[in-house]
Amino acid sequence: MRTSIYLEGLAHKVPIPSCARVGSLVMSGSIHGRDLSSGTIPDSPREQFQLIFANAEAMLKQAGGTLASVAFFQISVPDRALRSELDPVWVEVFPSPDDRPARHVSAVPGGRIEARFTAFVE
């Protein structure tokens, strides 16, 4: 049985949920660094990364999980140089090198900062 999860403030303009849970598997759609209270995306890449993880955490909470449930993050950036902004936030969110999800960062020139996750919730 599938459960669609809609995160207020991050809803799509089309009929697509923020993430979906099927059994223990939870997968997100695109997560942007949008401030859910104001609806704005800050100019600072670091703030966008912080908001991406906060928004992922809010989705996972609705799905019955936490960031500890995440097995994989796919992160897209317009320029690979932004990894220098991402890495400190990554270490703040996942401080233990023995307890981090896998991650792949891809550069999409002309794109924007966004992420997707795959998680397993007991």
Image: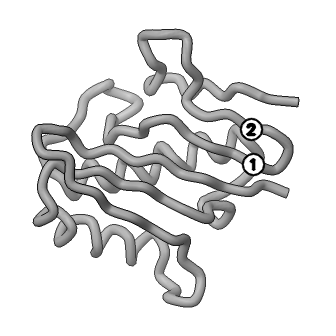
Q: Quadrant of residue 119?
A: bottom right
In the rendered structure, the answer to whether residue 8 lies left or right of residue 107 reads right
Q: Position of residue 92 (x, y in %)?
A: 39, 74
Kindly give the residue lying farthest to the top in the view shown.
14
Q: Where is residue 68 in the image (x, y as percent from the top left)?
A: 65, 66
For residue 21, the mark is: 2
Query: Pointer 2 and pointer 1: residues touching (CB < 8 Å)?
Result: yes
> Which residue is under mark 1?
25
Q: Position of residue 97 (x, y in %)?
A: 49, 88
Q: Which quarter of the image is occupied by the C terminus?
A: bottom right
> For mark 2, does the 10 Å Cα neighbourhood hold few (<14), some (14 to 19), or many (20 or more) residues?
many
Q: Where is residue 23 in the image (x, y as percent from the top left)?
A: 85, 43
Q: At numbered mark 2, what does the secondary structure look like: helix, strand or loop?
A: strand
Please give the name of the residue rendered at 57% of the width and 43% of the height, measured from the top-left corner: 58
- Decide which of 44, 18 is in the foreground and name it: 18
- Three-letter code for the amino acid on which mark 1 is drawn: Leu
> For mark 1, does the 10 Å Cα neighbourhood hold few (<14), some (14 to 19), or many (20 or more) residues?
some
